[in-house]
């Protein structure tokens, strides 16, 4: 009689401590070849730390106990030949995982050389195209910062697949993607798992993709396993109150907060861009054969105080370029940008300073927006022009708004989770008491309970402080929950704009309909 082969990955009684604090507490799990495991939990629950344990990449200051086995043998005895080859990792923040001054093609070639894999250019192009990118040659010849977050994430996913790993650990791999490309990436990962019999560990805070994506589910809370078992059983009949609260938070997020008031009585726009054309001229060796890219074409957009406007579109549609133009980041286009009815070109130096205080930006990747040498108290301090005692009081108020505990004031950003970093970025932007916030995917890295709270914070600021918000997002649920207006972009053009309820109920553009059709694919069994 033939013995059953050992499980692919087995973790038994894993505990990770920092000093006297348990960051992971007695975690056990097993993964079979071809099986998919979802790890669900809020920011700081220990999801990414558990992934790092699977990669044997723990900080030296942490103490670990328990056992991790790969095919029946201790993981640490084999990790040198497994990591990057048999075990692939797709990071949450693709920009931080990339080398900033080397093209992606060069990085891919170096990775294959380090792993002893023959690099095949045609195979690389084919893998990138499977992720939904139509021009792999141009994008692979670029530097990481020249791509959108979604484009960069898709290329890193393609890189992970070339080694044909036995286990893929995906840490929030779709948070930077629009609904259309989310569905494509999830289907690609699932198909790869089925074809190669590769196991998949899918770390997420998004309940809408857990059930169709994962065979088994583990729910973590403060480093403890709350539930572990078959996904459908847990989703249909959660045993623990914590799991039920996550499900309720998801339902709250996808609900509409009510019809906006007074949309027909708006004053003149506080911020507008008129007839904007933005041409990006490619640079670098691999871009010399490429033509100039028209990122934005004849775009006009108006933003109002006391209103929240949504901007939707797939990765690379021109959303971020338009948002940066509205923020005054491109002096060559000041003649197309208007603040309180005046062209930015005509503002005095003092008026331009006032404009930059009034128009604040919240970025998609909070880690790149902070000085890592500063702690949480010092970061908002830079943005507040008050005396020291008043500043401390103001900072504490800001932290209350975004639900960050005051005990973290002396913590550096490297000690914060992704969700905590984004909430700190929002607090810093609010410190200047702006008139309008330009938000580039501000909730994409947050778990759903915090997403709903941050979106509700925007609604509160709109109502109580007459704040205007531009919410750039690929998440139609977040836009539906929050926005008064919706503008849809594709290929650098505005396809349609109007009151959000009318746009979503009766879209006039085929592209808008495509975005709407892709959204329920994440909550149904689309795989």
Image (spheres, rainbow, N blue to C red):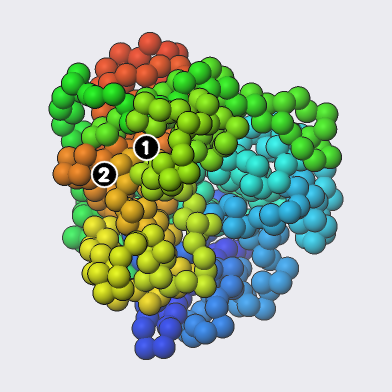
* Image coordinates for residue 428, horizontal then vertical, percent: 37, 58
Label 2 SS: helix
Q: Residue furthest bottom?
A: 20
**Seen in the image, is 440 located left or right of residue 395?**
right
Give 68 or 278, whichever is nearer the viewer. Answer: 278
Structural distance between the alpha carbons of marks 2 and 1: 10 Å
**Measuring 67% from the left and 72% from the top, which residue is drawn there?**
79
| Local crowd size for mark 2, using a 10 Å CA cut-off: few (<14), some (14–19), many (≥20) | many
Report crowding for label 1: few under 14, some 14 to 19, many 20 or more residues within 10 A (C-alpha).
Answer: many
Query: Where, quadrant-wise, is the N terminus in this rendering?
Result: bottom right
**Residue at the (66%, 51%) spot, across then down:** 160
Contact between labelled residues 1 and 2, with CB atoms less than 8 Å apart: yes
Q: Residue 169: name its quadrant.
A: bottom right
Height in image: 262 above or below 238?
A: above
Which percent across, then down, holds residue 157?
A: 62, 46
Q: Decide which of 130, 439 is in the foreground and name it.
A: 439
Q: Is residue 81 above or below residue 307?
A: below
> Residue 327: x percent and y percent?
46, 39
Residue identified by numbered label 1:
471
- 362 sits to left or right of 7: left
Q: Position of residue 130 (x, y in %)?
A: 64, 33
Question: Which one is nearer the viewer's eye here, 502 or 112?
Answer: 502
């Amino acid at each position: 009689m033939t013995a059953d082969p050992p499980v692919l990955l087995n973790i038994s009684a894993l505990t990770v401590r920092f000093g006297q604090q348990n960051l992971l507490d007695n975690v056990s799990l097993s993964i079979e070849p071809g099986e998919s495991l979802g790890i669900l939990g809020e920011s700081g629950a220990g999801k990414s730390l558990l992934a790092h344990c699977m990669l044997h990449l723990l900080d030296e200051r942490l103490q670990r106990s328990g056992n991790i086995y790969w095919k029946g043998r201790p993981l640490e005895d084999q990790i040198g030949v497994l990591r990057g080859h048999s075990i692939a990792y797709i990071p949450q923040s693709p920009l931080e995982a990339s080398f900033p001054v080397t093209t992606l093609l060069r990085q891919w070639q170096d990775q294959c050389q380090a792993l002893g894999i023959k690099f095949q250019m045609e195979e690389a192009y084919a893998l990138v195209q499977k992720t939904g990118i139509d021009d792999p040659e141009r994008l692979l010849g670029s530097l990481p910062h020249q791509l959108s977050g979604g484009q960069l994430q898709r290329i890193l996913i393609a890189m992970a697949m070339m080694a044909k790993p036995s286990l893929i650990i995906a840490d929030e791999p779709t948070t930077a993607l629009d609904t259309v490309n989310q569905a494509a990436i999830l289907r690609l990962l699932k198909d790869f798992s089925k074809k190669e019999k590769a196991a998949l560990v899918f770390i997420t805070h998004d309940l809408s993709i857990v059930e169709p994506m994962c065979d088994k589910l583990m729910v973590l809370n403060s480093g403890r396993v709350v539930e572990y078992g078959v996904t459908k059983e847990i989703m249909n009949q959660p045993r623990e109150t914590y799991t039920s609260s996550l499900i309720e938070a998801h339902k709250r997020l996808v609900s509409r907060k009510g019809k906006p008031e007074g949309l027909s009585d708006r004053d003149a726009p506080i911020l507008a861009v008129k007839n904007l054309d933005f041409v990006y001229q490619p640079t670098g060796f691999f871009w010399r054969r490429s033509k100039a890219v028209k990122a934005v074409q004849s775009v006009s957009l108006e933003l109002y105080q006391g209103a929240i406007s949504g901007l939707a579109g797939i990765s690379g549609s021109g959303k971020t370029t338009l948002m940066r133009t509205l923020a005054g980041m491109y002096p060559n286009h000041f003649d197309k940008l208007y603040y309180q009815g005046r062209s930015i070109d005509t503002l005095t130096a003092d008026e331009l300073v006032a404009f930059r205080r009034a128009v604040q930006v919240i970025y998609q990747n909070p880690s790149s927006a902070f000085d890592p040498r500063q702690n949480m108290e010092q970061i908002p301090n830079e943005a507040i022009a008050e005396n020291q005692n008043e500043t401390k009081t103001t900072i504490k108020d800001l932290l209350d708004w975004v639900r960050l505990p005051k005990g973290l004031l002396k913590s550096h950003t490297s000690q914060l989770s992704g969700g905590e970093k984004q909430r700190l970025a929002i607090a810093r932007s609010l410190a200047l008491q702006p008139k309008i916030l330009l938000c580039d995917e501000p909730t994409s890295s947050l778990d759903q309970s915090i997403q709903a709270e941050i979106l509700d914070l925007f609604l509160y600021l709109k109502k109580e402080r007459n704040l205007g918000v531009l919410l750039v997002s690929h998440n139609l649920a977040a836009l539906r929950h929050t926005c008064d207006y919706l503008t849809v972009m594709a290929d650098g053009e505005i396809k349609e704009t109007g009151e959000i309820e009318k746009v979503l109920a009766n879209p006039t553009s085929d592209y808008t309909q495509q975005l709407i059709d892709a959204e329920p694919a994440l909550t149904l069994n689309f795989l």
